[in-house]
Amino acid sequence: MISVNKLHPNLCKHGSCLQRALYEFTDVKTTKPDGSVAEHKETIILGHACENHVEEVNKLLKEIHYGDKESDDIQ
């Protein structure tokens, strides 16, 4: 049977920009299940940006996720 799923386009997260995002920002989340010795790594999506706002969204996400550290120092 063929199923149809609605697609949700990724839009730029910069202010009120509603352009389709061409870039995706990700990070790795490390978890340790209860009683487990092994770590589980999972890639999470932090946000999206169009070609005009890559630097601005990158700086914003760094400030949100790394707090008061100087965001330009974070790779």
Image (cartoon, rainbow, N blue to C red):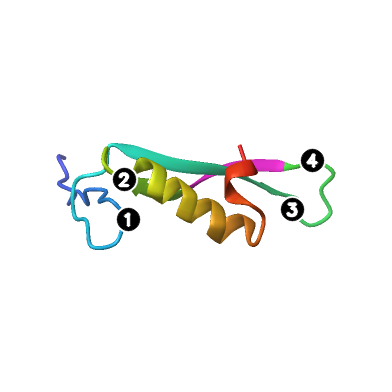
Residue under numbered circle 4 = 38
Image-based side of 61 in relation to 71, left or right: left
Mark 3: amino acid: Pro
Disc 2 marks which residue? 53
Which amino acid type is marked by label 4?
A: Ala
Q: Counting residues from the N terminus, which is met first, the one under dot 3 or under dot 1?
A: 1
Q: Which element is circle 3 on? A: loop
Sequence-first disc among 4 and 1: 1
* Inter-mark Cα distance, 3 to 1: 32 Å
Observer-side mark, 1 or 2, equals 2
Disc 1 residue crowd, few under 14, some 14–19, many 20+, Cα 10 Å: many
- Pick the residue in front: 52 or 8: 52
Residue interval drawn in magenta: 40-45
Looking at marks 3 and 2 on the same chain, the residue that comes earlier in the sequence is marked by: 3
C-beta proximity under 8 Å, tags 1 and 2 = yes
* Label disc, if present, on residue 33 of the rendered structure: 3
Q: CA distance from mark 1 to mark 2?
A: 9 Å
